[in-house]
Image (spheres, helix red, strand yellow):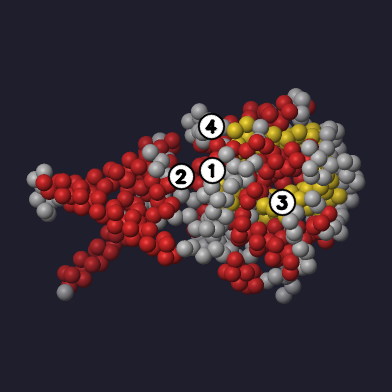
Amino acid sequence: MSPKAGKHSILFDAPPYLASAATVAGPREGQGPLGPDFDLIYKDLLLEQKSFEAAERKMLADACALALEKGNYRLEQMDYFLAGDLLNQITASSYCAAKLALPFFGLYGACSTLALSLALGAILVAAGFATNVLAATSSHNCSSERQFRYPTEYGFQRPLQAQWTVTGAGAAVIGAEGQPPRITAVTTGKVVDFNQNDPLGLGVAMAPAAASTLLLHFQELQRNPSYYDLIVTGDLGKVGMALNRQILARSGYQLDDNYNDCGVMIYNPDLQQVESGGSGCACSALVGLGHIWRRMQEGELKRVLLVSTGALHSPTTLAQGESIPSIAHAVALEMGDGS
Amino acid sequence: MASIHPELNITEEDYQTMVKREMPRPPLWRNCIIAFLSGGMICLLGQFIQNIYLSLGFSSTDVGNPTVVTMIFLASLLTGLGVFDNIARYTGAGTAVPVTGFANSMTAAALEFKKEGLVLGIGSKMFALAGSVIVFGVVTAFVAGLISAIL
């Protein structure tokens, strides 16, 4: 058994492997700077489906199929399916799970779902309850915009702190055996609510949650930011990233050039009109399972801390004047044997 | 009171100050000028269309209706073609304030909820954004009417 390294963190004795990973992306994401890292790029947002919700479902199914295919796994080898998305009642995941017929845990962590599913998958494998776990998440710009904000064709001036929901899906196989990277540690975040209420710039609401999880991770595992080649937050965007840096600096942790944010990395900020950056479950999924997983395979990155961030509000609570509670989960990915 | 987040060396109030400092400021002057020019262009187009209807024989009291209908049609068409939201990103209040903004909010909602059917989708969700404009428009008109009747 892996003892807990603190109230929030687990350091695995036998770190599970992130044995396979696959990403599928929408056209705008495909045109972005990380486009070459994705396994499949769709030409349009509907994927020949009758609705954006159905398109999101298809993306998730495609990502799962690709993750299995890339790792030479058969579906029957998977002990559990862990998935979540942004839609009400996480329908993209449930409809996808209906086709896979695996033991299924549906997750809701908003945009933190990637780290959440990887963490839980690693815990299941490390504890010996599973040999292989399929973890997946998706988001679709049009299905989430209409649910959380306005109809997609509604015209308005986006504020500079606004973020753009990423269209895409990512899936990964977490296995007791396989090829590195390994998931060496996880830090489970807690919900932090700093009384923010701007649904267009969620990075501002989520930055304290990201900072909380990062600080807990560094303190409980007695690590410094310099331990990692790359620390990435999920979707704080430019504005949230700056805020996160400042909160950490107040506690004496300087995030240097090895810190970035998936929302900032995924688009070309000058050309793609995304204001503060990307957001959504697929934001950390595409960057984490597409870009970072590849860089680790190629040996460019050895130690990465992925901190997916999620805003846990609903349009209803927001309309009733409540603030935006947020959460962040951290997953440490390391090449080699880990420790 | 002890903080429930002892790891965070910052209070909610301090964070609020930090957010205020970091929040990017919208280019107000630029937005105002673009809104003024684009809104003006739309009015100019409206006037042009009105003149056409006048030359077709509409009286000056009746000409407003076909003109507004034409403007609504154009805004809805652009919404359907997926162009309107791209324009409105730049023009802001310029396209939102005239009848074009109202048309866009209705057409966008109708398009969005078409997949949920005629009755529960288009019929009930079409006014999701524009509904309050109508409600408060009618209420304001009622109050204004009341005042004018009393005076």
In whole angstroms, how far apart are the C-alphas of marks 3 and 1?
22 Å
Labels 3 & 4 near each other (Cβ < 8 A): no
Secondary structure, mark 4, is: loop
| Residue denoted by label 1 | A141
In whole angstroms, how far apart are the C-alphas of marks 3 and 4?
28 Å
Residue A156 x, y percent position in the rendering: 43, 53
Residue A75 x, y percent position in the rendering: 73, 26
Relative side of B112 to B69, left or right = right
Name the residue: 18% across, 50% down.
B50
Q: Earlier in the sequence, mark 3 or mark 1?
A: 1
The one of B51 and A131 positioned closer to us in this rendering? B51
Q: Which mark is residue A43?
A: 4
Secondary structure, mark 1, is: helix
| Residue denoted by label 3 | A232
Relative side of A101 to A251, left or right = left
Labels 2 & 1 near each other (Cβ < 8 A): yes
| Residue denoted by label 2 | A152
Secondary structure, mark 3, is: strand
Question: Do tags 3 and 4 sit on the same chain?
Answer: yes
Q: Earlier in the sequence, mark 4 or mark 1?
A: 4
Q: Residues within 10 Å of mark 3 (few under 14, many from 20)?
A: many
Residue A225 x, y percent position in the rendering: 80, 57
* Host chain of mark 4: A
Q: Earlier in the sequence, mark 4 or mark 2?
A: 4
Q: Is residue B97 visible?
A: no
Question: Do tags 4 and 1 sit on the same chain?
Answer: yes
- The type of residue carrying mark 2 is Thr
In the image, residue A159 sits, relative to residue A301, either above or below, namely below
Q: Residues within 10 Å of mark 1 (few under 14, many from 20)?
A: many
Q: Nearer the viewer, mark 4 or mark 2?
A: 4
The one of B18 and B140 positioned closer to us in this rendering? B18
